[in-house]
Image: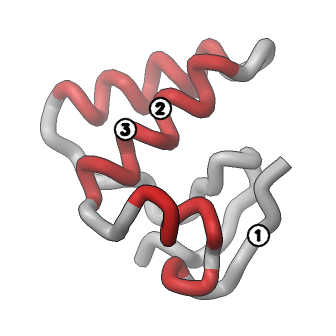
Amino acid sequence: MIPECPFKNDCAFYRLFGAEPRDVLRMIVDTYCLAPKGYQQCWRLAYRQDNGASPPPYLAPSGHPFQGLR
Protein backbone atom coordinates (compact mmCIF):
# COMPACT_ATOMS: atom_id res chain seq x y z
CA MET A 1 0.00 0.00 0.00
CA ILE A 2 1.26 3.45 -0.86
CA PRO A 3 1.08 5.88 2.07
CA GLU A 4 -0.64 9.21 1.90
CA CYS A 5 1.55 12.30 1.73
CA PRO A 6 0.61 15.99 1.94
CA PHE A 7 2.78 17.16 -0.94
CA LYS A 8 3.54 15.41 -4.19
CA ASN A 9 7.28 15.98 -3.85
CA ASP A 10 7.26 14.20 -0.47
CA CYS A 11 5.60 11.09 -1.85
CA ALA A 12 7.92 8.32 -2.99
CA PHE A 13 5.41 7.16 -5.62
CA TYR A 14 5.42 10.53 -7.37
CA ARG A 15 9.15 11.08 -6.95
CA LEU A 16 9.65 7.75 -8.70
CA PHE A 17 7.44 8.55 -11.67
CA GLY A 18 7.94 12.31 -11.87
CA ALA A 19 5.63 15.28 -11.75
CA GLU A 20 4.43 15.33 -15.36
CA PRO A 21 0.63 15.04 -15.11
CA ARG A 22 0.28 12.58 -17.98
CA ASP A 23 2.99 10.32 -16.52
CA VAL A 24 1.44 10.46 -13.06
CA LEU A 25 -2.00 9.68 -14.46
CA ARG A 26 -0.61 6.76 -16.45
CA MET A 27 0.98 5.31 -13.31
CA ILE A 28 -2.27 5.73 -11.37
CA VAL A 29 -4.17 4.02 -14.19
CA ASP A 30 -1.68 1.16 -14.22
CA THR A 31 -1.92 0.79 -10.45
CA TYR A 32 -5.71 0.65 -10.48
CA CYS A 33 -5.78 -1.70 -13.47
CA LEU A 34 -3.68 -4.18 -11.49
CA ALA A 35 -5.83 -3.86 -8.36
CA PRO A 36 -8.36 -6.70 -7.98
CA LYS A 37 -11.23 -4.38 -7.01
CA GLY A 38 -10.13 -1.34 -8.98
CA TYR A 39 -11.72 -2.06 -12.33
CA GLN A 40 -14.39 0.65 -12.23
CA GLN A 41 -11.90 3.29 -11.09
CA CYS A 42 -9.40 2.01 -13.63
CA TRP A 43 -11.95 2.48 -16.41
CA ARG A 44 -12.71 6.05 -15.29
CA LEU A 45 -9.04 6.97 -15.04
CA ALA A 46 -8.22 5.36 -18.38
CA TYR A 47 -11.01 7.39 -19.98
CA ARG A 48 -9.56 10.58 -18.48
CA GLN A 49 -6.09 9.64 -19.68
CA ASP A 50 -7.31 8.92 -23.22
CA ASN A 51 -8.97 12.33 -23.33
CA GLY A 52 -5.88 14.21 -22.17
CA ALA A 53 -7.12 14.93 -18.66
CA SER A 54 -4.81 15.65 -15.78
CA PRO A 55 -4.77 13.41 -12.69
CA PRO A 56 -7.75 13.75 -10.36
CA PRO A 57 -6.89 16.12 -7.49
CA TYR A 58 -7.91 13.93 -4.55
CA LEU A 59 -6.85 10.46 -5.54
CA ALA A 60 -3.83 8.45 -4.48
CA PRO A 61 -2.81 5.08 -5.90
CA SER A 62 -3.82 3.57 -2.56
CA GLY A 63 -7.36 4.84 -3.15
CA HIS A 64 -7.17 7.24 -0.22
CA PRO A 65 -7.75 10.93 -0.92
CA PHE A 66 -4.91 13.34 -0.38
CA GLN A 67 -3.87 16.71 -1.71
CA GLY A 68 -0.69 15.72 -3.49
CA LEU A 69 -1.95 16.48 -6.99
CA ARG A 70 -3.26 20.01 -6.68
Q: CA distance from mark 2 to mark 1?
A: 17 Å
Q: To which residue does mark 2 refer?
A: 29
Badge 2 element: helix
Q: To which residue does mark 1 refer?
A: 4
> How far across and down, in percent of the image, does residue 68 sit?
54, 75
Amino acid at the residue labelled 2? Val
Q: CA distance from mark 2 to mark 3?
A: 5 Å
* Residue lying at 63% horizontally and 74% vertically, measured from the top left: 11
Amino acid at the residue labelled 3? Arg
Among numbered discs 2 and 1, the one appearing first in the sequence: 1
> How far across and down, in percent of the image, does residue 53 sit?
22, 45
Badge 3 element: helix
> How far across and down, in percent of the image, does residue 47 sit?
31, 23
> How far across and down, in percent of the image, does residue 12 sit?
63, 69
Dot 2 surroundings within 10 Å: few (below 14), some, or many (20 or more)?
many
Q: Is residue 68 left or right of residue 45?
A: right
Q: Is residue 56 left or right of residue 1?
A: left
Amino acid at the residue labelled 1? Glu
Q: Is residue 14 left or right of residue 40?
A: left
Q: Is residue 59 left or right of residue 52?
A: right
* Residue lying at 15% horizontally and 31% vertically, measured from the top left: 51
Q: Are marks 2 and 3 in contact (CB under 8 Å)?
A: yes
Q: To which residue does mark 3 refer?
A: 26
Q: Quadrant of the C terminus?
A: bottom left
Above or below: residue 1 compared with residue 67: above
Q: Are marks 1 and 3 in contact (CB under 8 Å)?
A: no
